[in-house]
Image (cartoon, rainbow, N blue to C red):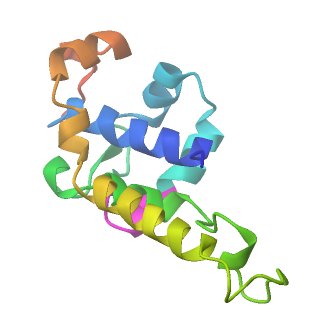
C-alpha cells in the first residue's frame, strides 16, 4: 500500500502550519517550501478546512493555520480524508467475483493488517511529526519574519 500525493502533502501542510504557529501560513509559501503548485495545495486545503483540521483567514494578511491543536490531529484523521480507497484486494469490494470468497482467509488477514495500520496511525499526531520545530523550520526556509501573526 502506498499513500497518495494528496495524503503526503496534506500531512506536510499540517506540519508546516504546526511549526509556524502561532502565525498564519501563506499558501504560496507552503507550496514553494514543498515544490508543489498553489492550485494543487488549494485543492488539498479544502477538505482539511471542512474537517476542521485547518482554518483559513481571509484578507490581505490572511493565510492558513491549524484548526485545532497539533496534538489533537492524528495521522489517521488526515489519511482518512485524503485516501479514497483502502481496499487492499478485490475481495474488499462489493460485487467481487473471486471464486474463493468465503473459503480463502486473505480478506480476513488483510483486514487485520489494515486495522493494525489504522491503530498505529491513530497513535501519532501532527505534534509528533513537528516536534523538531527548530530544525524543521530551517529546512522549510522559515524565519521569524515569515510568521504572519493574526490580526
Q: Is residue 130 above or below residue 142?
A: below
Q: Is residue 47 visible?
A: no
Q: Nearer the viewer, residue 107 or 146?
A: 107
Residue shown at 34% from the left, 11% from the top: 139
Q: Is residue 30 visible?
A: yes
In front here: 136 or 102?
102
Residue 69 magenta: no
Q: Nearer the viewer, residue 64 or 84?
A: 84
Residue located at (52% from left, 21% from top): 32
Q: Decide which of 64, 6 is in the foreground and name it.
A: 6
Q: Position of residue 61 (x, y in %)?
A: 32, 37
Q: Is residue 104 positioned above or below 11 on the image?
A: below
Please give the range of residues in magenta: 46-54
Residue positioned 17% across, 22% down in the render: 132
Q: Residue 151: image x %, image y %?
A: 17, 43
Left or right of residue 111: residue 52? left
Task: Indicate the position of residue 113 as horizontal and vertical percent values.
Answer: 45, 61
Which image quadrant is residue 96 in?
A: bottom right
Identify whether 18 is placed above or below 119: above
Q: Is residue 16 left or right of residue 149?
A: right
In this picture, residue 35 sits left or right of residue 97: left
* Residue at image point 63% right, 42% down: 40
Residue 35 place in picture, x, y as percent:
57, 21
Amino acid at each position: 500500500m502506498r499513500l497518495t500525493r494528496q495524503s503526503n502533502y496534506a500531512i506536510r501542510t499540517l506540519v508546516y502550519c504546526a511549526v509556524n504557529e502561532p502565525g498564519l501560513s501563506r499558501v504560496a509559501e507552503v507550496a514553494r517550501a514543498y515544490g508543489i503548485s498553489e492550485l494543487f495545495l488549494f485543492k488539498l486545503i479544502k477538505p482539511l478546512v471542512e474537517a476542521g483540521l485547518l482554518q483559513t483567514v481571509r484578507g490581505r494578511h490572511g493565510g492558513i493555520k491549524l484548526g485545532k491543536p497539533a496534538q489533537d490531529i492524528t495521522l489517521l484523521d488526515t489519511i482518512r480524508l485524503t485516501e479514497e480507497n483502502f481496499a487492499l484486494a478485490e475481495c474488499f469490494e462489493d460485487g467481487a467475483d473471486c471464486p474463493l470468497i468465503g473459503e480463502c482467509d486473505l480478506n480476513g488477514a488483510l483486514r487485520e493488517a489494515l486495522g493494525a495500520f489504522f491503530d498505529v496511525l491513530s497513535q501519532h499526531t501532527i505534534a509528533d511529526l513537528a516536534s523538531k520545530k527548530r530544525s524543521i523550520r530551517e529546512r522549510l526556509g522559515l524565519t521569524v519574519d515569515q510568521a504572519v501573526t493574526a490580526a
